[in-house]
C-alpha cells in the first residue's frame, strides 16, 4: 500500500498530470486515495493523499525533501523541476505548488474533481 501510494504521488508530481494519468492509476491505487469511494478524486482527497505522500518521503521529518530522500522516487531532472528555487531541497511549498498545479491541469473541466 505504501509503495502504491508513493508511486501514485510521484506520477502526479512528475508528469504534468492529465485525465489519462489518472485513468492509468490502477483501481487499487485509486481506491486508496478516493476516501469516500465515489469514484471521483476531490481536491480534499487529493490534498490528504498529497500530504500523506510528503510525510512518507520526508524521512527525517524536517519539512523538506533532500536529494537523498527524493532519490528513490525522482530522477535528478524531475527533482529539479519541482525544486523551483534550485536550493537542492524540495520545500513543502514547492511540493504543494507542484501538486496543486498538477491537480488543476488534470481537472480539465474545472469541476474540482478528477474522474
Ligand atoms: Ca471521492
Ligand atoms: Ca527531509
Ligand atoms: Ca527548493
Image (spheres, rainbow, N blue to C red):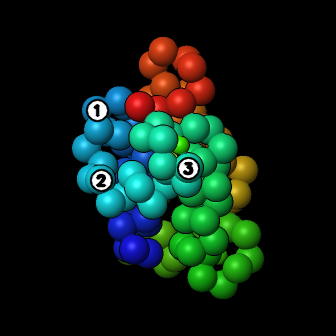
Residue 4 % position (x, y): 36, 67
Quadrant (top left, top right, bottom left, bottom right) of the C terminus: top left
Please give the name of the residue rendered at 29% of the width and 53% of the height, measured from the top-left corner.
27
Label 1's element?
A: helix
Q: Indicate whether 68 appears above or below 20.
A: below
Please give the name of the residue rendered at 44% of the width and 75% of the height, measured from the top-left corner.
2
Check the image and name the residue furthest to the bottom: 60
Please give the name of the residue rendered at 73% of the width and 69% of the height, measured from the top-left corner.
63
Please give the name of the residue rendered at 27% of the width and 53% of the height, measured from the top-left corner.
26
59 or 110, which is in the foreground? 110
Residue 97 % position (x, y): 65, 41
Sequence-first tag of 3 and 2: 2
Disc sitting over residue 57 in the figure: none
**What is the tally of numbered marks visible in this picture?**
3
| Residue at which label 3 appears | 36
Residue density around tag 1, few if under 14, some if 14–19, many if 20 or more, within 10 Å? few
Amino acid at each position: 500500500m505504501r509503495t502504491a501510494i508513493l508511486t501514485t504521488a510521484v506520477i502526479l508530481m512528475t508528469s504534468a498530470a492529465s485525465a489519462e494519468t489518472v485513468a492509468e492509476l490502477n483501481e487499487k491505487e485509486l481506491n486508496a486515495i478516493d476516501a469516500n469511494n465515489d469514484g471521483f478524486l476531490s481536491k480534499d482527497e487529493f490534498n490528504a493523499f498529497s500530504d500523506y505522500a510528503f510525510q512518507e518521503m520526508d524521512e527525517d521529518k524536517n519539512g523538506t525533501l533532500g536529494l537523498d530522500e527524493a532519490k528513490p522516487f525522482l530522477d535528478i531532472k524531475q527533482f529539479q523541476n519541482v525544486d523551483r528555487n534550485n536550493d537542492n531541497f524540495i520545500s513543502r511549498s514547492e511540493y504543494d505548488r507542484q501538486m496543486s498545479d498538477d491537480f488543476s491541469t488534470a481537472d480539465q473541466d474545472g469541476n474540482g474533481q478528477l474522474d
